[in-house]
């Protein structure tokens, strides 16, 4: 028997604990594991350190009080440049941040994946990234005089990504234009979770994906959650595009408008959510 | 077709000029007017530029804004964008909420970083871009709020702090370069019906004023490309105050 890694939202949440450092795949408002983000948002988890190429995942977790610190290079909804819920949390001073250049962020994840303490880069030199991250150090090249930023490994307790197709053992493929950094997020984490549009038989994986898109292998994954339209309202090409109309409603749901949005779209289970957004 | 160019069309040409001489590098432009400008440069005097669609493809044809009829000549997912950034073979044109006389740029936050008055998008790739390859900026609202003595947060690094080279700032009033002894900003040209005084009074730092010209007007061929091929929906006009 081979391992069946299929699991449920409740089991995923039960494996997490307060204060964990969690990585969330995707990019901006693109192929985000939103069903898992919503599950975290309605759980009792708190004080999370969220590591993300940030989009509405960061905004929702900020707005629901789950976040102690965000590690980020940007937070955006792409078609709406500023994430309003992240902005509100920052301006209220209710969260801490570690702000990096987006390439430094990649190198931090890669260092964790490769089990090295840091990776060197020129990105960050001369900028205020060095000022606001006093723990960030430079290192002199052992082969010359050049000073480089030593980006520390971004070790994750757990990582969540959303893939177009997966099998029950954790092999998974993206079908859209970009994997983003989802493989690196998984490799940087202790507990690794994939949500997917469809769980298919292993020998069906290459029916839709080219082999170059089969980038997640089962050694990188601990749990698989079947989650059709689970990236909604972010894009999940080619299965579906971003739901721009819904994203606008989300972005407008600030202040007094937030509790109603929360009650209708977040404090409900996944099937009720999907029914509410696709009546 | 009237050959009288609009202000937006002068800005497009000024953005295109920023890429002159670049050769076979990736031209990454953010905003409507810089995007049209980079595409115009390649369609005319800088044919070797590489251009992406902002998603994951290098596009070989003269694509209109919002166009989907792409001739794909390469695949550059974000991971490979970093490869190109760090190789130095790129020229980016970014926006700036604040910018100083050496081209230090802020897109992170206004006010203290611990608790900003206004949270912006975040530093994005600006720190890495600016120390690795050529950088220019597009500012559609030239004002003292943008052109400041000191930025609140240095996202993009200026010429006094180790930039690979801040080359050009194009605004709705004119164009600046950094061809000065200390590589600080110099007013290079002003657009028609704008004056040197307009620029000076809307700039919050001392600007070198020397040999200022009127901005180059688009040629008949360039106007035709802008209006009929690259931006038939006239999105360029929505990006600046007329």
Image: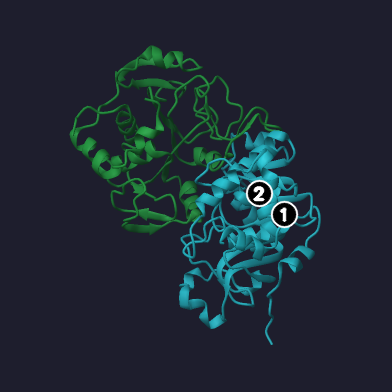
Chain colours: A cyan, B green
Crowd band around label 2 with a 10 angstrom C-alpha radius: few (<14), some (14–19), many (20+) = some
- Relative placement, left or right, of B170 versus A191 is left
Residue B198 seen from this side: yes
- Name the quadrant of the N terminus of chain A: bottom right
Q: Nearer the viewer, residue A40 or A264?
A: A264
Distance of label 2 from label 1 (alpha carbons): 13 Å
Residue A187 seen from this side: no
- Relative placement, left or right, of A45 versus A2 is right
Chain containing the residue with disc 1: A
- Res. A41 mark: 1
Chain containing the residue with disc 2: A
Residues flagged by tags 2 and 1 on a common chain? yes
- Tell me the element at label 2: helix
Q: Nearer the viewer, residue B219 or B80?
A: B219
Residue A107, position in %: x, y?
A: 61, 52
Q: Nearer the viewer, residue B201 or B233?
A: B233
The relative height of residue B213 versus residue B159 in the rendered view (above or below) is above
The relative height of residue A176 versus residue B155 in the rendered view (above or below) is below
Residue B181, position in %: x, y?
A: 43, 20
Residue tagged by mark 2? A261
Residue B48, position in %: x, y?
A: 30, 47
User: Quadrant location of residue A162?
Assistant: bottom right
The residue drawn where x is 66% and y is 63% is A272
- Res. B219 mark: none
Q: Residue furthest toward the front?
A: A279
The first of marks 2 and 1 along the sequence is: 1
């Amino acid at each position: 028997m081979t391992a069946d890694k299929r699991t449920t939202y409740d089991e995923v949440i039960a494996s997490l604990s307060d204060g964990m450092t969690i990585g969330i795949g995707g990019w901006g408002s693109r192929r985000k594991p939103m069903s898992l983000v919503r599950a975290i948002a309605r759980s009792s988890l708190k004080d999370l350190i969220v590591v993300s190429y940030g989009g509405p995942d960061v905004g929702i977790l900020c707005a629901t009080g789950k976040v102690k610190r965000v590690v980020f290079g940007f937070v955006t909804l792409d078609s709406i440049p500023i994430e309003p819920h992240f902005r509100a949390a920052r301006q209220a001073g209710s969260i801490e941040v570690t702000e990096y250049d987006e390439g430094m962020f990649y190198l931090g994840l890669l260092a964790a994946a490769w089990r090295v303490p840091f990776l060197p880069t020129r990105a960050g030199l001369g900028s205020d990234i060095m000022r606001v991250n006093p723990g960030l150090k430079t290192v002199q090249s052992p082969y010359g005089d050049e000073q480089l930023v030593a980006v520390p490994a971004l070790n994750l307790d757990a990582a969540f990504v959303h893939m177009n197709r997966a099998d029950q053992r954790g092999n998974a493929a993206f079908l859209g234009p970009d994997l983003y950094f989802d493989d690196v997020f998984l490799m940087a984490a202790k507990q690794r979770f994939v949500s997917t549009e469809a769980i298919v038989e292993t020998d069906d994986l290459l029916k839709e994906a080219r082999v170059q898109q089969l980038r997640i292998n089962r050694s990188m994954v601990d749990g698989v959650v079947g989650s059709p339209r689970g990236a909604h309202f972010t894009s999940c090409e080619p299965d579906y595009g971003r739901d721009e109309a819904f994203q606008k409603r989300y972005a407008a749901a600030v202040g007094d408008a937030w509790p109603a949005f929360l009650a209708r779209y977040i404090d409900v289970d996944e099937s009720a959510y999907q029914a509410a957004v696709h009546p | 077709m009237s050959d009288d160019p609009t202000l937006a069309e002068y800005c497009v040409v000024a953005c295109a000029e920023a890429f002159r001489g670049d050769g076979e590098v990736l031209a990454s432009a953010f905003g409507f007017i810089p995007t049209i400008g980079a595409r115009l440069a390649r369609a005319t005097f800088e044919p070797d530029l590489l251009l992406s669609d902002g998603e994951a493809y290098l596009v070989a044809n003269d694509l209109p804004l919002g166009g989907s009829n792409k001739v794909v000549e390469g695949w550059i997912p974000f991971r490979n964008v970093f490869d190109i950034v760090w190789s130095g073979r790129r020229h980016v044109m970014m926006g700036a909420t604040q910018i100083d006389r050496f081209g230090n740029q802020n897109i992170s936050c206004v006010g203290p970083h611990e608790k900003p008055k206004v949270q912006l998008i975040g530093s994005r790739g600006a720190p890495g871009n600016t120390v690795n390859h050529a950088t220019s900026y597009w500012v559609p609202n030239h004002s003292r709020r943008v052109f400041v003595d000191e930025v609140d947060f240095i996202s993009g690094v200026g010429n006094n702090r180790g930039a690979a080279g801040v080359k050009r700032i194009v605004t709705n009033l004119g164009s600046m370069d950094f061809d000065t002894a200390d590589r600080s900003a110099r007013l290079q040209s002003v657009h028609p019906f704008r004056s040197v005084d307009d620029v000076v009074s809307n700039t919050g730092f001392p600007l070198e004023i020397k040999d200022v010209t009127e901005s180059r007007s688009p040629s008949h061929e360039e106007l035709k490309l802008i209006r009929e091929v690259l931006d038939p929906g006239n999105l360029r006009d929505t990006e600046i105050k007329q």
